[in-house]
Image: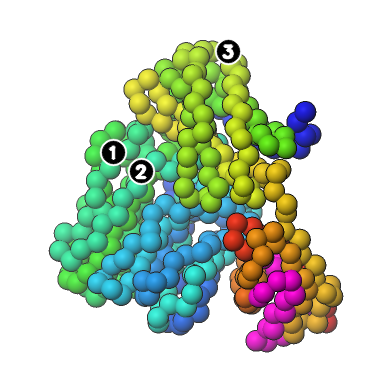
Amino acid sequence: MYRTRTITLILSTLALKYSVAQTHVQTTTLFQTTTASTISKAFGAASTTGNLIVVHLDWDGQTRHINTVTDNKGNTYHKINGSTNWNGANYRAELWYAYNITGGAVLTVSATLSGAPTSFSQIYISEYSGIAKTIDPLDQNSVTTGNAAAVNSGSKTPTYANELIYGASIGASGTLTTGGGFTNRSTANSNIIEDKTVTTIGSYNTAFTSAGGNWIAQMASFITTNAILPVEFSSFTTQSSHDHILLQWTTASERNNDYFTVERSDNGSEWQAVGIVKSAGNSDMPQSYSCEVDETNAPYSDFRIRQTDLDGRSIYSKTIQVNNGNRDQATVIIYSNPTNGHSLSGKASFKTGGTFTIAIFDMGGKMVGRSVANQPMFTVNFTHCLPPGVYCARFSSSGYSASTSFLVND
């Protein structure tokens, strides 16, 4: 018997070619000279639901990496590439994105490093409309470092016509200029954010020109709503038993489809194929598919469906997350709730035992406190009294995580 807990994603039509073109909406940036491990920047205007956000980050300190990228609407951000070391042993960079975002407000995007940078960090955030919403739109990406005058991210071939090519290049010293055929979106700090839409399939890169010094160049391509895709997904659901997970999906139509690959990740970044299902190939009628996999020892697993054409091209479904039912969950108790804003105390229980980290966030997604504790009791003392409001406490141990909210009163 399967538990009644079911996660469902309804996916709208992919196979039709839409008339909405890809459009750059806004780009903004922040450079901060500080050893703070968090950097946050708000867009200049409200973002629109369904759009794409691309985030470039770089900092000094090659022992650090980006732990999380978040925003004040709870959108999920995924890493494209990095961490990439550049400028000798000095700097590092990463590229992230969120698609089919929840908007309706001015988004503040925040990135948290694994530790303090040496002296600076910077963030560039860009918003685009007209990007595919019901699949993962990321297609290709590349990154190159160097010091030649001709700056190049390295070439990749987009899978579909009409893809968005996003480029970012950061220089350690010399001024950078926009590459030919690209539209410049930012020249802040003598660096470049650029993009273009390519109408045909071919080899592309993001190119820039440097006045001298070391640089890093990044590229990412995204599938737009002008792309004609081979599969029209209509649903993707999961059901969990005590030791198995049943994945089911349906298509409304298929063109030259070969097979589906079920992929799983227990850490959000490394994916493993856990099942292959042969497709109908060509169909104008609804088709149903399923695949059953074992649960793992991780507290949760991410799943996605990779569709492969007869010519070898692939697209990915959206990702859904499933709690593995065979694991005991972490428990957290806060004493007392509401709190006075000076400190937070309580008890946390993780099956793995040992130490755990506690990160405190305000409702805007900004980290306002962090501590490491030994089980079961903990206390987080804040450097300043927290203003009244609702806060989130995130607890992490080896293989486990848990979150809870608490209230600060006057």
Q: Which mark is residue 140?
A: 2
Task: Give the residue displayed 83% in from the left and 74% down from the top.
Answer: 335
Q: Which quadrant is home to the N terminus?
A: top right
Q: Of marks 1 and 2, which one's residue comes earlier in the chain?
A: 2
- Mark 1 highlights which residue? 157
The part of the image, by quadrant, that contains residue 119 is: bottom left
Q: Of marks 3 and 1, which one's residue comes earlier in the chain?
A: 1
**Dominant secondary structure, magenta:** strand
Q: CA distance from mark 1 to mark 2?
A: 7 Å
Task: Provide the residue span drawn in magenta.
Answer: 373-395
Q: Nearer the viewer, residue 127 or 267?
A: 267
Do residues under tags 3 and 1 come within 8 Å of each other at their CB atoms? no
Under circle 2, the secondary element is strand
Task: Give the residue displayed 60% in from the left and 53% down from the top.
Answer: 75
Vertical relation: 309 (above or below) 90: above
Which amino acid lies under the numbered mark 3 shown in the image of this protein? Met
Residue neighbourhood size for the residue with mark 3, other residues' Cα within 10 Å, grouped as few (<14), some (14–19), many (≥20): few
Q: Position of residue 258 (x, y in %)?
A: 43, 20
Q: Is residue 375 left or right of residue 27?
A: right
Residue neighbourhood size for the residue with mark 2, other residues' Cα within 10 Å, grouped as few (<14), some (14–19), many (≥20): some
Q: Nearer the viewer, residue 396 or 251?
A: 396
Vertical relation: 107 (above or below) 316: below
Q: Which mark is residue 217?
A: none
Do residues under tags 1 and 2 come within 8 Å of each other at their CB atoms? yes
Q: Position of residue 270 (x, y in %)?
A: 46, 47
- Mark 3 highlights which residue? 285
